[in-house]
Amino acid sequence: MAFQRLTLAHPVPKSFALCERRIAGIACIHTKYARGSVRLAPSQRLVLSKPSLQALSFPSVSRGNCDDSATRRSTAVSPSAESVSELISFVRVNSPFYRELWAQLPEGPLDVNSLPIVDSDAYWKANSIKGNRLVTGAIIDGGIYKTGGTTASPKVAYYTREELHRGTQMLAAGMVRGTGLIPGDRIANLFWSGDMYAAFLLLVLTLMELSLPNIHLPITGNLAPLNVVNSLRDFKATVIVSNPSTILRIANHLVQCGQTLPDMRLILFTGERYHHDLRNLVRSAFPRATVGPLMFSSVDGGLIGLPAFPPVYGGDDDINPTYVVNTPTVIMEIISDNGEAITEPYRRGRVVITDLMRRLQPVVRYPMGDLAEWIDYEARTFSVYGRDSEAIKIGPVSMDLQRLRQVVAKALGDQAVDGFQVVARRKEGMSEMLFRLSSCPEDPEGAVRSLEKHLIEFFPWWSQSVDGGYVLPLAVEWVSIQDLQYNERTGKVKAIIDERFTK
């Protein structure tokens, strides 16, 4: 594919270009002259890979060593009040669920802040397969997809053909801008496919919209690790796109076989948080690969955030990625426990979104179930910190997954932990919590004592609950990565397994 050259009348100011982060000559540009992903030649000429990207607006967010401080922040493009009001009016007229929810609100133009946050259970009860009360019209052209959630009964999301097309266009532009792809990359699609799961198909459609020339390798993550590795090697893949659990399975296979894939230069993940304890194993299998996020999204909520900038090898873009809201299509709010909107940086709250593109299945003030905090509210950059509902209660003690991971990290220190799973079960008439760890400590008994010690430090009530006979002491299993339990549809590790209600 030949690149079109765009010669500018005068130099481009640094403050308009993300010129400090170039990967193989690819930089991002957002100026009054042009917008999109460009190849930056030594003469400072701009080579625009696809002029039509000018039609897609993304806030320019920068970091790095540019002298001009203006590169460090930018104001996001906000949706117009008219577009918000028009969406609300449309949904109110056409969706029985929202019409009932907003029945007590005054007629006339409304803004998002005047609307109640949706009750998630009520939303999904209305979004039934039969007698649907959420959708705004007949489902005659588009797609129906199951969510990739870990619940026993996956939810269903409806998209029109146009909504799906526009979503893949926005993701494609975001990939060019913020993932580090370069022309000619051979992109291995390792998402799981089948059973109406959307991720694999989404990447297929997105790569067809990508402005950079690329080769799609539709391998899927459903296959045995040996078959996946053979395809990666035979077809000289340079990029992997998948969820962290599948990446971990492939990396573990390579390490167990004493092999590496040194030509893999980029790994993009989504669907799960990429934890610090994955680094050693993934780096052993893919020693030259940079790891970073693909997007912050879900099938039910749509495309919410995109990487704010390309990942850096050896940096923290894997465990602490920065996203930028997909404005002006999405309005994202971070809401405190008392229901107030958070605008100050580094204060965590619940993610609530409104998608101005979704008309068939409206998403208006919908709680995503994720925790996040703003990095820069004006630029709409943010970090995500897992699910607000990822917790487990053992006896009287409620423990969130994030802090349990911190217990493991502090207790085991530098010892490699390739996977972690929390299991709640009944034994001897009481509840028991089991840590299932993919690790081989030199001193297993000492490691268990350290885990117990740090668990009590993080959750002081745990000791009293054990001593009082309310719960059993912590149990620990040291297993191989294959012995962890995985979601059969998505291939993700089940972070929390509650067996007390299934037996």
Image: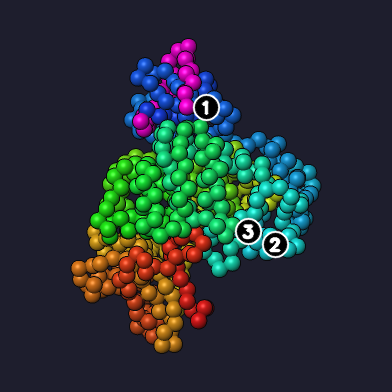
Left/right placement of residue 467 relative to residue 372 reads left
Q: Earlier in the sequence, mark 2 or mark 3?
A: 2
Name the kind of residue labelled 3 in the image: Val
Q: Which residues are magenta?
A: 1-24
**Callout 2: 10 Å neighbours few (<14), some, many (20+)?**
few
Q: Where is mark 2, residue-wise?
A: 129
- Is the residue under label 3 in contact with that under label 2 (CB below 8 Å)? yes
Does 476 lie within the magenta span? no
Viewer-proximal residue among 436 and 456: 436
Name the kind of residue labelled 2 in the image: Ile
Disc sitting over residue 126 in the figure: none
Q: Based on the displayed image, in which of its 4 quarters is residue 409 positioned?
A: bottom left
- Spatial CA distance of label 1 from label 2 is 40 Å
Seen as rendered, the residue at the extreme front is 234
Q: Based on the displayed image, in which of its 4 quarters is residue 227 positioned?
A: bottom left
Q: Where is mark 3, residue-wise?
A: 156
- Is the residue under label 1 in contact with that under label 3 (CB below 8 Å)? no
